[in-house]
Image (spheres, rainbow, N blue to C red):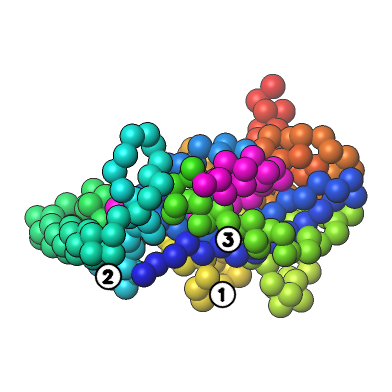
Amino acid sequence: MFHPQAAIIADSINITGDRLTTFVLTYHRMVHSEFMTHRMLSKNSSSSRAIPVEKMIKLVESQEVYPLHWGKNQKGMSAQKEVTEAEIEAASAVWQEARLDAIRHARRLVEIGIHKQVVNRLLEPFSTITVICSGTEFQNFFEQRCHPDAQPEIQYLANKMKAAYDASQPQQLTTGEWHLPLIKPEDIEEIRDMHELIKVAVGRCARVSYLNHDGVRSLADDVKLHDRLLTSKPAHLSPFEHVAFALPDSEKRANFTGFQAYRFDIERNKLKKSA
């Protein structure tokens, strides 16, 4: 049975102690709306519209996504007690039947010729979502989602994130140094130009939409994706939020405190040009 996963892929701290952390997360698609309410976190997620239906079906079949807690019905938003073992077994069988039905109906829609942006919606309750998430202010998220009243699936995720956060040692950055998610030491050895490294980091963060951010390493393709996102009309700038440089103080700029996102710089320059 699937359980949420959380890993830190970049962790930085500026000279005034502000910390910017980037996670890659995989969790139950059913709690994605709850995660999205935390607007101080910058996010990019795998997209049902971008993933081929058969790939989505294989993920649904292999991951076995079930509720983590079969709560007994009661008043209010949270279930305290779980049902009996026999009832859990019965409920799991019903859930599995619904999953198989969703897969069957998804394939029927494909036969009709329906696009994946519609077909994959049937599979979402039984699927996971992968998210790259960056932020300097996780305390409110941890307080709300590690709480016993939080839905068990997001509570499990939040506890995994907090454990990783507490165990991680952020890299000390001087003013102007860059926080670069998904950049490896061999990338730095191969690419000496910081602007090119920034482009590669953006491209890799963007690939989470297609669930191939951890696939075959191609620096040229990552740079091309960065350029395409930047020059498209309209520009697609959310992946540009995860790459940021350290500020000399705790000034707040857009989502981050003590750091300035690459996106912030791009949008500010656009405003200057249009003025």
10 Å crowding of disc 1: few (<14), some (14-19), many (20+) = few
Depth check: 12 or 142 in front? 142
10 Å crowding of disc 3: few (<14), some (14-19), many (20+) = some
Q: Which percent across, then down, holds residue 2?
A: 39, 67
- For the record, the magenta segment spans 124-148
Tell whether 199 sits left or right of 24. Answer: right
Q: Say which residue label 3 marks.
A: 160
For the point 78% across and 69% down, the residue is 192
Tell whether 269 sits left or right of 37. Answer: right
Secondary element at tag 3: helix
Is 270 drawn above or below residue 148 in the view shown?
A: above
Depth check: 60 or 93 in front? 93
Amino acid type shown at disc 3: Lys
For the point 27% across and 70% down, the residue is 61
Please say if the residues under marks 1 and 3 sit with CB atoms less than 8 Å apart: no
Q: Which percent across, then down, holds residue 67?
A: 34, 57
For the point 51% across and 64% down, the residue is 5
Distance, label 3 to label 2, CA atoms, is: 24 Å
Is 197 drawn above or below residue 229 in the view shown?
A: below
- The image shows a total of numbered marks equal to 3
Q: Mark 2 or 1 closer to N-term?
A: 2
For the point 32% across and 39% down, the residue is 74
Distance, label 2 to label 1, CA atoms, is: 27 Å
Q: Mark 3 or 2 closer to N-term?
A: 2
Which quadrant of the structure image shows residue 218?
Answer: bottom right
Q: Say which residue label 1 marks.
A: 217
Amino acid type shown at disc 2: Glu
Q: Nearer the viewer, mark 1 or mark 3?
A: 3
Quadrant location, the C terminus? top right
Please say if the residues under marks 3 and 2 sit with CB atoms less than 8 Å apart: no
Circle on res. 61: 2
